[in-house]
Amino acid sequence: MASDANYISPQELYAELPTIAAPVVIDVRPHEAYAAGHIPGAHHIPVDTLAARLGEIPRDRPLVTY
């Protein structure tokens, strides 16, 4: 994990999302979990495809993965 990365709980994320300036939210869970429910606006990039799809992730905004 990068030294500037931080872990926050799902509850903390939910509380802080309105204060984060235009975050990119990436849902790395399996398709079934994403389909069952996800944070509105989250991009679905399953963890097993993440390395190959890093180029799709904007680098000019805060990033949240779950």
Image (cartoon, helix red, strand yellow):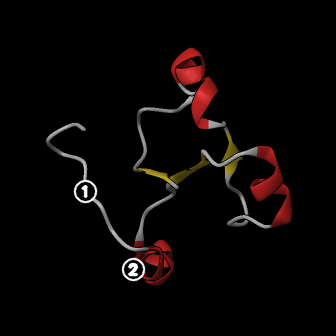
Mark nearer the N terminus (2 vs 1):
1
Q: Quadrant of residue 12?
A: bottom left
User: Image point 46% across, 82% down: which residue?
Assistant: 11
In x, y percent, where is residue 36?
84, 65
Q: Secondary structure at mark 1?
A: loop
Between 62 and 53, which is closer to the camera in this rendering?
53
Residue labelled with disc 1: 6
Label pair 2/1, CB-CB below 8 angstroms: no
Q: How many labels, in total? A: 2
- Which residue does the numbered mark 2 point to in the structure image? 12
Task: Locate the N terminus and report the quarter of the image it occupies.
Answer: top left
Residue 30 picture location, percent across and down: 72, 45
Q: Nearer the viewer, residue 14 or 61?
A: 14
Q: Is residue 5 shown left or right of residue 19?
A: left
Numbered disc 2: secondary structure: helix
The crowd level at tag 2 (other Cα within 10 Å; few <14, some 14-19, many 20+) is few
Residue under the image location 25 percent in, 56 percent down: 6
**Residue type, numbered disc 1:** Asn
- Looking at the rendered structure, the kind of residue marked 2 is Glu
Q: Residue furthest left?
A: 3
Q: Is residue 58 above or below residue 51?
A: below
Q: Give the residue displayed 49% in from the left and 55% down from the top.
A: 23
- Which circle marks residue 63 in the picture? none
**Is 4 placed above or below 15 here?**
above
Judged left or right of residue 17, residue 45 is right
Q: Is residue 3 positioned above or below 48 on the image?
A: below
Residue 3 relative to residue 32: left or right: left
Gap between marks 2 and 1 measured at Cα: 12 Å
